[in-house]
């Protein structure tokens, strides 16, 4: 099943767990106080693209890992980054700060870009490059 990445699915689900819990417990926590429709559109297209292309490998745009070792590096680095992401959620749960906003937007951006490079997924690289700057900017502007 080269078209389906079970590890990508697991990574996306784990990334989403603290976001869903936060959204349920702190409904006011996701208020977007900085309104820039163009940036928001880029961020949303990039975000959903990243989620989709982490899970689904589109033939002709995905070329797989260079080697078994590269695949192992992908699994290890993504797992460590996701563990760090979840740890920051736990540690900074009630704290609204620039650190939290940037950490919780930079880490997933790195995960998606790194995953795209390691799996040689052109669409994941493109959507992560589209999403990262806009997601980081929105997160930063919302904490100021």
Image (cartoon, grey):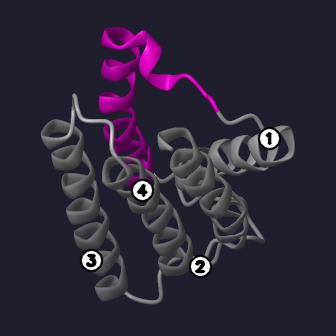
SS of the residue at dot 2?
loop
Identity of the residue drawn at 35% across and 43% down: 10
Is 18 in the magenta? yes
Q: How far apart are the alpha carbons under marks 3 and 1? A: 39 Å
Give the residue drawn at x 42%, y 56%: 102
Which residue of the protein is positioned furthest toward the right in this rendering? Answer: 38
- Numbered disc 4: secondary structure: helix
Disc number at residue 102?
4
Q: Nearer the viewer, residue 89 or 3?
A: 89
> Which residue bears the numbered disc 2?
120
Question: What whole-number distance in Å separates the C-alpha atoms at marks 1 and 4?
Answer: 18 Å
Which comes before the other along the chain, label 3 or label 1?
Answer: 1
Q: Position of residue 11 (x, y in %)?
A: 36, 48
Q: CA distance from mark 3 to mark 2?
A: 14 Å
Measure how far apart labels 4 and 2 are at the Cα level.
26 Å
- Main SS class of the magenta portion in the image: helix
Secondary structure of the residue carrying tag 3 is helix
- Closer to the chain start, of discs 4 and 2, is 4
Where is residue 31, by image quadrant? top right
Q: Does the CB distance between marks 3 and 1 fall below 8 Å? A: no
* Residue at the image position 35 percent from the left and 14 percent from the top: 26
Assess whether mark 2 and mark 1 are in contact (beta carbons under 8 angstroms).
no
Q: Which residues are magenta?
A: 6-33
Q: Earlier in the sequence, mark 1 or mark 2?
A: 1
Crowding at mark 4 (Cα within 10 Å: few <14, some 14-19, many 20+): some
Q: Is residue 94 left or right of residue 30?
A: left
Mark 3 highlights which residue? 72
Query: Dot 1 surroundings within 10 Å: few (below 14), some, or many (20 or more)?
Result: few
Is residue 93 shown above or below 84? Answer: above
Q: Does label 1 or label 4 sit earlier along the sequence?
A: 1
């Amino acid at each position: 099943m080269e078209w389906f990445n079970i590890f990508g699915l697991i990574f996306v689900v784990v990334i989403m767990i603290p976001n869903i819990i936060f959204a349920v417990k702190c409904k006011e926590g996701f208020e977007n106080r900085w309104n820039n429709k163009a940036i928001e559109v880029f961020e949303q297209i990039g975000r959903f693209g990243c989620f989709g292309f982490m899970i689904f490998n589109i033939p002709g745009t995905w070329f797989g890992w260079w080697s078994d070792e590269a695949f192992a590096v992908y699994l290890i680095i993504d797992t460590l980054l996701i563990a760090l992401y979840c740890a920051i959620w736990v540690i900074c749960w009630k704290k609204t700060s620039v650190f939290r906003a940037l950490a919780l937007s930079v880490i997933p951006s790195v995960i998606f870009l790194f995953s795209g490079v390691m799996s040689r997924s052109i669409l994941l690289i493109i959507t992560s490059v589209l999403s990262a700057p806009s997601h980081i900017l929105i997160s930063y502007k919302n904490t100021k």
